[in-house]
Every structure is written in C-alpha cells, then in structure tokens.
Image (cartoon, grey):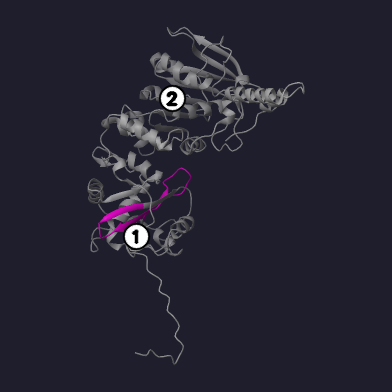
Amino acid sequence: MAWCSTAQVQRQSTCVHTLSKSIEEQEVEILSALLLDKRRNRAVYYEPYDKQREFHRAGKLYRERLLIAGNQLGKTYSAGMEVSFHATGKYPHDWDGKRFDRATLIWTGSETNESSKELIQGVLLGTESTSKADPDFGTGSIPHDAIFKVSTRQAGVKDVVHEILVRHVSGGLSRIVLKTYEQGRKTWQGKQVDVVWFDEEPEYSIYSEGVTRTNTTGGIVMMTFTPLLGVTKVVESFLSPSEGDIPKSVTTMTIYDAGHYTDEKRAEIISSYAEWERDTRAFGVPMAGEGRVFQIAEETIKCDPFEIPRHYARICGIDFGAGGATSHPAAGTWLAWDRDADIIYVYDCYKRSGETPVYHSSAINSRGKWIPVAWPHDGVNNESDGRPLKDKYLEHNVNMLSRSARYDEDRGGSQDVEPVVLEMLERMRTGRFKVFSHLHEWFDEFRMYHRKDGKIVRVKDDIMSATRYATMDLRCARPQELTVQKRHVPQGLRMVG
C-alpha cells in the first residue's frame, strides 16, 4: 500500500548535485535522504497486515468498526495510519476503505492524558518527539510537511497535545482533537464529527456520544482495543447485537496475524502470559464474560496441515447466507474423518457475503464434487421465487445430501444445537477434533463463539454453524473413491496355467 511522494523524488535528486563528491559520499547522502524521508513520511511506506487491511476495508461498508486484538500487535498503529489518510486526503493508490474528499474533523479518545500522549499522540506525531521544539517533530503517521499547527493543553502532564491542524489536499485544514475519557461525557457532546477513533474501550455512554457525533456527517466510528474488561456493554453491542441494530464490523487480530514476530518470539510471548489471560492478550478473546462455547485453548486443537489420505472419510457442511454486502454470509466447512482413530480434522473453510448460489456452488464444487454436503433445515424453505434454496444448489450439481442435517434419520426438521456442540467440545478435550492451523477465519469465529443468558449467540457464527452440520452428519462422510483403470485384453488371448 505504498506510493512514491514528490518530496521523496526531490530529496533523492538533490542529493547528487555535484561531481566533486566521491561516489561513497554521494551514496551516504542519498541513503540519509531516504531515511529522513521514511521517518517523516511513514504513511507513504505503510504496508498493512491482512487483518489490518480487512479492518480498513470494512470502513467502506460499516459505520461502526471494532479491531479487537491482543497486546502489541499493531492495532493502534493501523488506526493511526487511517486517521492520517482521512486528515490529509492522501490515500494509497489501492485504498479500498472509507474516503473523504474534503478536510475532516476527527476526534480521538484515550483513557487518560498520559495514555493519549504515549499512544495516540505518539502514533500520530512520532514517538521520537512530543514537543514542538523538537526538530524531529512529525515522525508519526501524519507526514511532516502536512502538519500545520499543534496545540497543547494544561493537563498536569507535560506537552500533552490537544489539537493538530493538518493540511488537506483539497486546500483546507483538517482538525484532529485528542480527547480523554477522564474528561467526562459532556466533552463528547456538541459538534458533528467525521471520524471518531476510540483507542482502548470507553464506557458505553461515551461511546454512544461518539456515534451520535457522526449521525449527520456520514462519518465513521472505529475502536481498537484488547478486551481486558470482558464482555462489556460496548463489546456486547458488537458481538451480540439486538434485533434491528445497524450491522457493525468486528475484526479479530491475533499474535499469529502480526508479521513483526517470529514463531519463536510468539511462543515466548504467549508463554509469558498467565494462563487465565493468555487468550485475551495473545488472541484478543474477551476476558471472562458469560462464557465461551468452547472453553478450551485453541493451541490444543491446532495441527499443521497435511495431505488428507484417500481413505479418510470426508464431508462438507454449509450454512446458507442471505443477500447484501453486510448481511449473513454463506459458509462452508470441510471435515476429514480418520475412522480408525476416530479423529475429525477440519481442513478447509469458506465464507462469503453478497453472492448468489451460483457463486457458492462453484466454490463448493471446486473442493471436490464427490464430497457429500450437509445442510440446515431452512434449506427447504421457499425463496422469493417460490423455490427451496437447496434446489438452487442441486441445479449446479452440488452433492447435497437427500435430507437436511439431523442426529437421527427418522427425526428431521430443525435440530437442537446443544448435543452437537457438546460432542464437538468432548472431542476437543480428548484430542479427537483437530483444526488445520492456517484456517484463520475458522479460529476467528471459534474465539468469539459465546453464550448470552445461557443460549448460544447466533451472530458471526456462519463457519461454526457449517461445522456443526458436518459433524452432525458425520456418519454420511465417505472416502474418495479409487479410480481403477481396466486393462484391455485382446480378444482370443487366454490365460495359460
């Protein structure tokens, strides 16, 4: 997501301005100019990880976004970069998130003045500099030459920034106002704002005020935090929305999604956390709460991918989606069953929104048309055109089972969720349910699969549902058939012996 700035080209060209200097001296000057440009134009060199890119992309579709992540994974850094883009109007050439074509008013939120200075201020203006007198001012996400003015406030903490004025490509000035939660709810009232960024979780009343500020501007609200407070009202509004709520986006980023760590360093960091906080600090799983459905460490069910032996029985489970880019996605999960050891391996998964059965059918068939497909009972319901949804998949040669997923062949219809969930959990605990480690979307849902008032929350559980249907119909799994080629024996040739 990088582009070449005009300032960068100018700096490079002015370095080689005389033939009287040695080649070594010229090379040193060029390198120094490049390093200075990189420090003062960090946004130009921003290369987001996949999860950060997913978070940015969601801004085009969702008004409210949450990047929920473990500690030190880059969540604040990515939001700081997006704030820079919205403030300057200098979007990367391949930016596919939200855009503004005018100068913007942006509010940021931190818990205290200290955290505002150390985190948000450090990301926006540079960790090397926190004062206007510092010659390295402007080494953060906002380009050095885009900073017009910085104002500080008297807050008992030296050089705490209150406001940053930023030059926008339209010719106007964007305003970034750095607020804190300790200032109270009233300071979050009044103006209409384009972008609100909460770094670390606010109380619900402050979050609600932030959302209200964007009501008339077509603006966006984004949050970045590690869920150490558990399933609070703010978290619950994202993970367990009420009926009729506007759709919101949740992106989960784990230590395995952060490319600045090696595998050895990841293992070291994970082991350094207390067992009870490991899931939260490394994987972004909300602390405590009413209870995850699968209360088991994901490391115990992960396994390295391997080539599935032909004699393993396979089955696919699908969950039918609904139309619209932000609506219920269609999902599929592929299981391989080692019947000798009675171990299930989840080796593939798929999820996509806003596509037709034709598209989903193609995705399913591409993974093996011979694999039987388990499907939920709502597939027998008629669509707007009067045809059952399952029939649309059959028309495209998907190997659908002849009836919907069920525990007992004689008992069809809608099935209770709990028995298969308990079976999956028991398999996980006894080492008989494994998941290929590269299936990030599967683990994203696994981490957030939770209960409310004792019942499983049916939100962002599409892949989990597909896994349930496949597990429920595991007896229908079958191995890949061997293709036997018959040898042609010329007529009249007889075996002698």
Counting residues from the start of the chain, the first of labels 1 and 2 encountered is 2
Amino acid identity at mark 2: Phe
- Of the pair 274 and 295, the residue shown nearer to us: 274
The residue under label 1 is: 314
Amino acid identity at mark 1: Arg
Q: Residue at x 24, y 37 (%)?
A: 453
Residue 14 rendering spot, x and y as whole percentages: 72, 23
- Please state, as top left, top right, bottom left or bottom right, where the N terminus lies in the image: top right
Secondary structure at numbered mark 1: strand
Count of numbered badges drawn on the protein: 2
Q: Residue at x 36, y 43 (%)?
A: 443
Residue 171 rendering spot, x and y as whole percentages: 66, 22
Q: Which mark is residue 198?
A: 2
- Please state, as top left, top right, bottom left or bottom right, where the C terminus lies in the image: bottom left
Asked whether residue 253 appears in the rendered view, the answer is no
Instruction: Decide whether residue 341 is among the magenta residues.
Output: yes
Magenta-colored span: 317-346
Residue with the most extreme right position: 19
Q: Which of label 1 and label 2 is nearer to you? A: 1
